[in-house]
């Protein structure tokens, strides 16, 4: 095993020594960090607290392409977010930024009002598309989401939106401008515009939780579009892109429509989900379209069940039945996923990725993830492949 993976294995081994598993141990001290600074007024009308997350990733990447190969051991802070959230009566506010790169990238920065007929939100937040995208990165099953969320450019934008849900139905719609500029500036990065909507149904039938949904986004591009993605491993290279930016030989993308269908089921420790999506592009010759689909399934070996939030129509935090702090094993989960995208309209053939993973939740807000991903872009004139063994240490509050 390569150096970075070996170091992580040693660190995990140290955590699992008998002394570390004692009741009064480092896990207790780590759990204390979940009690972040917060304040609430005496009448309970106003409250405020810190929020954040840190993801540290290690990977051993084997990359092959006509443009070169190799890569080897790599590591990064995938995410290092810090922010604040609060509430005043019917108003909620969130401001969170990511400090893991040279630029201070904005994430959720919005104000939300709880009206009698749903929540109205203004600020910088995700367009309402895809079950996988609407599930927080803290609670997705694998280190990276399905291929289409990256390939088709699902993102956060400055917008005004409405969200509504009851016990079984969720609906949301919004109008959006461009993504927010970096470095704490509440300003648009470009002149792109978008409309988006999502509807979902979910209910428990016997012992099974079912979810069905669909979403749409129309995006008017300002600077064209590149359809590209990492092979479900952020520390690998991106596979070759379909370039529809100004000056491209393929033509410039003026507008695109995203359509997505989603389904999921949870029954005891078993869970499964899948999505089918299409990106239709207007502007280039022939108005190219790309289709993408994934299916995944997982099982909690320690008996937990994946948690679902009807107010978001997405998955939420899974808590271990017996954490290490309580003298238990934490929660252990195994999972597998297969992705495929048809990029024939750009003469790029098919993009496939298969992932297997293990998740360990020693505490409510701590997770260790190990994924093996094998991916291939099988184009008519060339091929690119990526095989990645990667691990993540995750902590949030």
Image: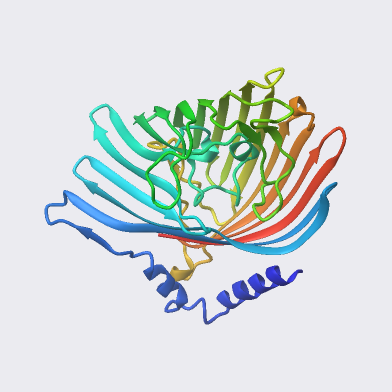
| Placement of 326 over or under 187, stated as above or below | below
The residue located at (51%, 49%) in the rendering is 137
Total numbered badges shown on the rendered structure: 0
The residue located at (57%, 32%) in the rendering is 223
- Which residue occupies the foreground of this view, 86 or 35? 86
Among the 4 quarters of the image, the one containing residue 120: top left
| Placement of 317 over or under 331, stated as above or below | above
Image spot of residue 211 (x, y percent): 50, 31
- Which residue occupies the foreground of this view, 190 or 299? 190
The answer to whether residue 30 shows anywhere in this view is yes
Name the image quarter holding the C terminus: bottom left
Most extreme residue toward the front is 247
Name the image quarter holding the N terminus: bottom right
| Placement of 26 over or under 89, stated as above or below | below
| Left or right: residue 287 compared with residue 180 | right
Image spot of residue 256 (x, y percent): 58, 24
| Placement of 223 over or under 281, stated as above or below | below
Most extreme residue toward the right is 381
Image spot of residue 220 (x, y percent): 52, 25
The residue located at (42%, 30%) in the rendering is 176
| Left or right: residue 252 compared with residue 22 | right
The answer to whether residue 321 shows anywhere in this view is no
Among the 4 quarters of the image, the one containing residue 81: bottom left
Image spot of residue 255 (x, y percent): 57, 23
| Left or right: residue 175 compared with residue 372 | left
Most extreme residue toward the bottom is 19
Most extreme residue toward the left is 43
Which colour scheme appears in the figure? rainbow
The residue located at (57%, 26%) in the rendering is 258
């Amino acid at each position: 095993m390569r150096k970075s993976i070996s170091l992580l294995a040693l660190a995990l081994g140290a955590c699992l020594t008998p002394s570390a598993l004692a009741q009064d141990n480092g896990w207790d001290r780590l759990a204390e960090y979940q009690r972040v600074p917060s304040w609430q007024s005496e009448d309970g009308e106003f409250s405020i607290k810190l929020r954040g997350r840190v993801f540290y990733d290690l990977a051993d990447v084997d990359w092959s392409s006509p443009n070169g190969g190799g890569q080897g051991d790599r590591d990064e802070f995938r995410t290092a977010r810090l922010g604040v959230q609060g509430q005043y009566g019917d108003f909620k506010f969130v401001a969170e930024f990511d400090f893991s790169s040279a630029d201070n990238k904005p994430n959720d920065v919005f104000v939300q009002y709880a009206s009698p007929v749903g929540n109205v939100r203004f600020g910088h937040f995700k367009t309402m598309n895809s079950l996988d995208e609407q599930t927080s990165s803290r609670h997705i099953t694998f280190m990276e989401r399905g291929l289409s969320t990256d390939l088709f450019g699902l993102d956060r934008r400055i917008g005004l939106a409405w969200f509504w849900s009851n016990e079984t139905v969720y609906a949301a719609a919004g109008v959006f401008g461009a993504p927010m500029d970096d470095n704490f500036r509440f300003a648009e990065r470009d002149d792109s515009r978008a409309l988006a909507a999502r509807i979902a149904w979910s209910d428990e039938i016997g012992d099974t939780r079912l979810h069905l949904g669909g979403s749409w986004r129309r995006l008017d591009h300002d600077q064209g579009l590149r359809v590209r993605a990492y092979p479900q491993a952020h520390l690998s290279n991106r596979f070759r892109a379909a370039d529809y930016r100004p000056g491209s030989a393929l033509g410039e993308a003026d507008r695109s429509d995203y359509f997505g269908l989603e389904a999921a089921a949870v029954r005891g420790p078993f869970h499964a989900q899948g999505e089918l999506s299409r990106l239709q592009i207007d502007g280039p010759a022939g108005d190219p379209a790309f289709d993408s689909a994934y299916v995944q399934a997982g099982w909690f070996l320690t008996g937990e069940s994946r948690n679902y939030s009807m107010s978001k129509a997405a998955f939420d935090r899974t808590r271990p039945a017996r954490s290490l702090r309580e003298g238990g094993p934490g929660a252990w989960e195994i999972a597998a996923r297969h992705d495929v995208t048809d990029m024939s309209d750009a003469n790029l053939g098919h993009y496939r990725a298969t992932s297997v993973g293990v998740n360990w939740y020693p505490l409510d807000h701590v997770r260790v993830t190990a994924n093996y991903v094998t991916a291939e872009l099988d184009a008519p004139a060339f091929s690119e492949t990526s095989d990645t063994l990667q691990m993540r240490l995750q902590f949030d509050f």
